[in-house]
Image (spheres, coloured by chain):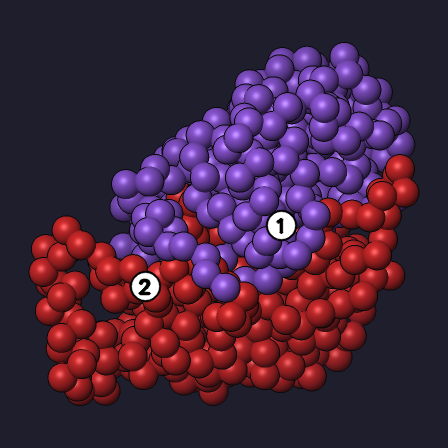
Chain colours: A purple, B red
Amino acid sequence: MYVNAVPGLPEIDAGDDLAALIEEHGDVHDGDVLCVASTVVSKAEGRAYALDDFPPSPRAREIAARLEEVTGDEKDPRFAQAVLEESMELAIEAPFLLTETRFGHVGVNAGIDRSNTGGADLLLLPERPSESAERIREGIDADVAVVVTDTCGRPFRHGQRGVAIGWAGISASRDWRGETDRDGHELAVTVESVVDELASAANLVTGEGDGGDPVVVVRDWAFGDHDGSDNLFRELDGDFVRQALREWEFDR
Amino acid sequence: MYVNAVPGLPEIDAGDDLAALIEEHGDVHDGDVLCVASTVVSKAEGRAYALDDFPPSPRAREIAARLEEVTGDEKDPRFAQAVLEESMELAIEAPFLLTETRFGHVGVNAGIDRSNTGGADLLLLPERPSESAERIREGIDADVAVVVTDTCGRPFRHGQRGVAIGWAGISASRDWRGETDRDGHELAVTVESVVDELASAANLVTGEGDGGDPVVVVRDWAFGDHDGSDNLFRELDGDFVRQALREWEFDR
């Protein structure tokens, strides 16, 4: 498996044709997986906004005031308003905002970026990242899969890692259920989130800073002959951590 | 970056010299990262056990009975005993056992495997995986980094993905704090858990079933000129999910 960044992509602006730019700068083959950072998808889709685009509701002011109180840092109620508008549910309100986005991804601040925004105040995640992935896929001549990636933190472990927020031309997971180990026992590891693993592999070569290359080509990797599933985001019903967070209140 | 499994490794037994076997079957160069599945590290270190090696305490019986009650599946108190002995703290007792291992990793059943065990009832994780990684690293002639990997699930997202449980010759994370984006703004993504991303990349080519190849070589990847950190496992103090789970009780 080869994992290589596409070099030399220009700064992306609203309306840019990402598929055409990727084909122009990259060497894309049938069977490749293209991992595309959500930042450039968002920029191409015009998801950069000014803080003033989000006049804060009383709820947003309340959330920002509480965050300011518990963190000691200044918090902009317009930012809280943007997070609220992007979210279906708040999982944690303090000491930071952890929310479920409208497309099911749970992340801090609904994944809204304040760096690498191309000069805007805020860069929101794509509205429907799997549809974005499908549009890029359709725009590429070769028969590829596309994964739209983001980076985020997680419980239990420090640091951030690449995750998938949208995908097309590939199942989100390989389902090994019913397959056996060398001794003929059914496998304990049953569902492998390959789009997240592809996003993590891509993040190793993307870089984040001045020299960031937001598109990565994964080549000579095959999903293989397994069942697939597109069920990536947990429902509240089966997510005990979400349930525990519902009952929890930050207290300092 | 190239990510390729080492082909043809034999079934690993207690006492086997993993470093020698990797050198014999793989083509290892200076600068490579070797991702080694914890299963083979555990087998080489004699971490395969029979259930009877874990006579259950009253606490283990209580835990198994509760799990049986809430899941409707038969639960072996000897297995619960093994999990208890491997754990520092239980984060969830039902409807499954989520614990913190003695080396700080939070995982279901303390990472104890019941498939791919080489015929034993149970395969425990290595006792000190970073020390295991260091021993493999020292046994390899080339100047390599070693990541000991496991696969596990996570909150918010379905499926399992590769994670690091031990490492040597590399920092766990790249620390981008203080570095800037193209516009000169400080980056929001500050600490990248590269050992987890390497483990995820490796898991894409490892396979789990009959044809599993437990060792993967990552080549032409560089950590780069960033600060590093070995702080991978969160302390309870900064982990709000762990805190919420402490107060939560599964109720059906």
**Residue A61 visible at all:** yes
Q: CA distance from mark 1 to mark 2?
A: 25 Å
Residue B27 visible somewhere in the drawing: no
Q: Quarter of the image holding residue B72?
A: bottom left
Write down the quadrant of residue A112 in the picture: top right
Left or right: B209 as drawn, with respect to B65: right
Q: Amino acid at mark 1?
A: Glu
Image depth: mark 1 or mark 2 in front: 1
Q: Secondary structure at mark 2?
A: helix
> Which chain letter goes with mark 1?
A
Q: How crowded is the residue under tag 2: few (<14 C-alpha within 10 Å), some, or many (20+)? A: few
Label of residue B247 in the image: 2
- Residue B13's x, y, as percent? 42, 79
Residue nearest the observer in this picture, A116 or A55: A55
Identify residue for label 1: A68
Q: Please determine whether, in this image, residue B223 is positioned above or below residue B51.
A: above
Out of B252 and A142, give the one closest to the viewer.
B252
Residue A153 relative to residue A234: left or right: right
Question: What residue is rendered at 32% in x and 57% in y?
Answer: A188
> Residue flagged by tag 2: what amino acid is it?
Glu
